[in-house]
Amino acid sequence: MSDNWKLKNYYYLSDYEAAIVEANESQGDNIEKKVYLYRSYIGANQPEVVLDEIFEDEESISLKAVRLHAKYVMENNKEEVINELKEMLQNGTSENPDENEILLIISAIIFCNEGNFDEALKYTTQAKSIESKAIQVYIFLKINRVDLANEGVARMSKIDDDHTLTQLALAWSSIFQGGEKLNEAFFIYQEMAEKFQINPMLLNGQAICNLKKNKFDEVLDLLNDSLKQDSKYPDSLANSIVANKHNQKSDEQINRKLAQLKRTKNHPMIKMLDDFEDNFERASMAYSAIEQ
């Protein structure tokens, strides 16, 4: 078992604050520990810490990749960062396969965020780790290929059926398929909470299971628990908006959470609403031109 087992699992479960505490309290100062510490800072919306502590002349390929990810999160000019990433992929590989692995994983995450799933899959295919296979499952579900996602989960199970990422990937696939599999997903999140500790990501996973079963009161209870832990957690806010709408809550409550969500930036729901508003505005302008 890796010396950084607990740190990595907190990271996989999106419990970034717990991961940061674990890294700062644990012994040793190896590259893997630094990688997951700084990735946790990015997950916790503190990419500036990464840019302050990993310098541009860093020799470690994996830490350079993490720094580039932090820069991607902060920079408005994403294209410039992506060009840097492509140059790094072409010229900056290491003789150490573990270092290259992190570079490939971060490349896949960035291209996923860009919506370029073909490019992201290219890098997950080159990578060997179970994390890269979890990203593959995520991509297959995003492109509605649940058959390929299930094959990916099966491959992960052969490597390590009890691995946190294998169980999470199984939960994602089960939620996507719905029906009786929602119960399986719900209990996976419950087991993760008992094994580690409850956190907003796990509560949101359970909430989505109940949302798909139309148990809206239970959804709101879970999301309220999540917001008590972190009042700014984007998925809790987004899912609360959906659940409040179904429960016919006041527009004031819904708009308050929407305003909070907009302040978090980069959430898919905000992008979807922005695209809708842009399309509506273009359609209105076209209609006005016809009327004139």
Image: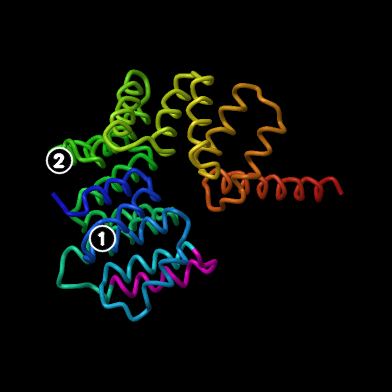
Residue 218 numbered mark, or none: none
Amino acid carrying mark 1 in the image: Lys
Distance (Cα) linking label 1 and label 2: 21 Å
Vertical placement of 92 versus 18: above or below? below
**Mark 2: secondary structure:** helix
Task: Report the coloring of the rendering.
Answer: rainbow
Which label lies toward us, 1 or 2? Answer: 1
Crowdedness near tag 2: few (<14), some (14–19) or many (≥20) residues, C-alpha within 10 Å: some
| Location of residue 96 by image quarter | bottom left
Q: Residue at x 38, y 45 (%)?
A: 15
Q: Is residue 71 toward the left or the right of residue 29 in the image?
A: right
Closest to the observer: 197 or 204?
Answer: 197
In contact (CB < 8 Å): disc 1 and disc 2: no
Q: Which residues are magenta?
A: 74-89
Q: Residue at x 66, y 34 (%)?
A: 254
Q: Earlier in the sequence, mark 1 or mark 2?
A: 1
| Location of residue 122 by image quarter | bottom left
Specify whether residue 77 is painted magenta: yes
Q: Is residue 270 toward the left or the right of residue 182 in the image?
A: right
Residue with the mark numbered 1: 33
Specify whether residue 183 is painted magenta: no
Vertical placement of 78 versus 241: above or below? below
Q: Main secondary structure of the magenta part?
A: helix
Work out which residue is located at the far bottom of the displayed protein and give it.
Answer: 57
Residue 160 numbered mark, or none: 2
- Horizontal and vertical percent position of residue 280: 69, 45
Q: Is residue 1 toward the left or the right of residue 15 in the image?
A: left
Q: Residue at x 65, y 22 (%)?
A: 248
Crowdedness near tag 1: few (<14), some (14–19) or many (≥20) residues, C-alpha within 10 Å: many
